[in-house]
Amino acid sequence: MARAGERRTRQRENILRVIADAGAPVAPREILTRVQSRLKGLGLATVYRTLKLLAESGVVRLVEIPGDPPRYELADKEHHHHFSCRLCACVYEVPGCCGHFEEHLPAGFRLESHEVILFGICQTCGAGRQARESAGSSARALKRTPSGRAKARR
Amino acid sequence: MARAGERRTRQRENILRVIADAGAPVAPREILTRVQSRLKGLGLATVYRTLKLLAESGVVRLVEIPGDPPRYELADKEHHHHFSCRLCACVYEVPGCCGHFEEHLPAGFRLESHEVILFGICQTCGAGRQARESAGSSARALKRTPSGRAKARR
DNA sequence: GTATATGCAAACCCTTTGCACATCT
DNA sequence: AGATGTGCAAAGGGTTTGCATATAC
């Protein structure tokens, strides 16, 4: 994790671990809470400073879901996108990609990367509505993190 | 624009017109500046109040580019996505869509909408580098709005 | 031992809210 | 006239920064 002149501290190790273990992007507030369960005195400022550091060194990546607080995830994950549940406001990782983004891009525009965010209703929330017919869903494989959102979108 | 009990004022008309004329999503600060050139006394609070109103009534839509301030655009535009230039930080509209987002979505997840953001270098910024060979680029058709971003991303 | 990191509190955004005045119908 | 909207300034919430202390190397 450390670059030249950067120190390995308990705070940084714990913050990075929380992000790595989350399985889906986490917000600063959430990181603070989770780390504090193991490292009592941690301050929010340290979380922000560490996130900035990790983002600049390319270890971590900013993920923004419209209407939600910013979240962070490991930068070296396989290519994937995110799904945001309209009901529970949880964010899930969705593996793979549909590609073909150059298609509609006018000449002269160079595409370097892209971001896809899917909105809808997650398996957990949907199960409460429709009688759960398929017992074994592949959705179980997805990890998620709750949002800092208080009220549902729209 | 008005719903029941809502009034048509110079402020609201001007704010809506600025959003409609922009051609690409605009930030609250930018809206304030542009409207003030025609309507001197406008306050930032009114911009926010009007944006909230317009968003709730479905006239306007929130567009968030990671790392940028929030922007707003007309909600009734044809389906499109956005391109954010890494160099000039301008945002462009990109017509069309690559579709096929259900593909990798696990069973039990219901997809309702999606958001695609493209990152790269725009035609204007790219022209400065590579000798401008193609005189007539289709990119001219795209409109853009500058970002509130002070420094370039990453 | 020295440079770097942390915690706390203050400072800084951006956004929202309270209130008196202005404006629309 | 009465209800709704606006501007200003204060309040809120998230993020950053200054500074003395604690910690890593």
Image (cartoon, coloured by chain):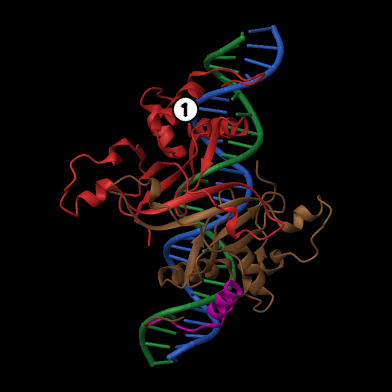
Chain colours: A brown, B red, C green, D blue
Give the residue displayed 19% in from the left and 45% down from the top.
Answer: B134
Q: Position of residue A116 (x, y in %)?
A: 51, 54
Q: Is residue A19 magenta?
A: yes
Q: Is residue A109 above or below residue B49?
A: below
Q: Which residues are magenta?
A: A5-20
Task: Please identify the quarter of the rendering in which residue D17 is found.
Answer: bottom left
Quadrant the N terminus of chain B occupies: top right
Task: Please identify the quarter of the rendering in which residue B50 is found.
Answer: top right
The crowding category of the residue bearing disc 1, from other C-alpha atoms within 10 Å (few below 14, some 14 to 19, many at least 20), is: many
Q: Callout 1: helix, strand or loop?
A: helix
In the image: residue B132, left or right of residue B137: left
Quadrant the C terminus of chain B occupies: bottom left
Q: Position of residue A153 (x, y in %)?
A: 65, 45
The residue under label 1 is B15
Q: Is residue A11 magenta?
A: yes
Q: Please, what is the dominant secondary structure of the magenta stretch?
A: helix
Tell me the kind of residue under disc 1: Ile
Give the residue displayed 47% in from the left and 38% down from the top.
Answer: B28
Task: Please identify the quarter of the rendering in which residue A127 is found.
Answer: bottom right
Q: Nearer the viewer, residue C14 or A124?
A: A124
Which chain hosts label 1? B
